[in-house]
Image: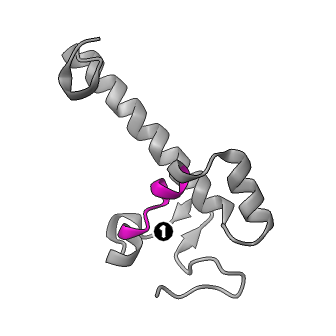
């Protein structure tokens, strides 16, 4: 288990998200913040945060990373002409 602060935040969580993202331990990689963002929509994340069950900054950072990945995929498909899954044009 990764060490946490008294408020439940990970000790590596900084103002802009994870401070060790590129070199995170296996436990953190398995519990990627992107999976949290994909699992919960904004309203659910806010409700869980209010109940003290989710750090909203973790959800927010995951959401930012997912959006960046989606944008990279869109840019890549524009370059190759692929617009669908598995390289098929729609």
Q: Residue furthest right?
A: 50
Name the residue beneath numbered marker 1.
19
Image quarter for residue 82? top left
Give x and y (percent) for residue 20.
42, 70
Q: How is the image coloured?
A: one colour
Residue at figure coordinates x 27%, y 21% from the top left? 77
Q: Is residue 58 above or below residue 53?
A: above
Give x and y (percent) for residue 49.
74, 63
Majority SS type along the magenta span: helix
Q: Is residue 60 above or below residue 69?
A: below
| Direction from residue 62 to residue 44 in the image, left or right | right
Residue at figure coordinates x 41%, y 30% from the top left? 71
| Direction from residue 27 to residue 86 in the image, left or right | left
Q: Which residues are magenta?
A: 30-37
Q: Is residue 71 above or below residue 61?
A: above
Residue at figure coordinates x 51%, y 48% from the top left? 38
Is 60 colored magenta in this rendering? Answer: no
């Amino acid at each position: 288990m990764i060490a946490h602060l008294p408020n439940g935040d990970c000790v590596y969580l900084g103002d802009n998200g994870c401070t060790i993202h590129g070199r995170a331990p296996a436990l953190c990689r398995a519990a990627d913040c992107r999976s949290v963002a994909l699992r919960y929509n904004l309203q659910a994340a806010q409700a869980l945060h209010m109940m003290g069950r989710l750090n909203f900054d973790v959800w927010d950072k995951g959401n930012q990373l997912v959006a960046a990945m989606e944008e990279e995929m869109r840019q890549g498909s524009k370059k190759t002409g692929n617009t669908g899954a598995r390289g098929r044009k729609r």
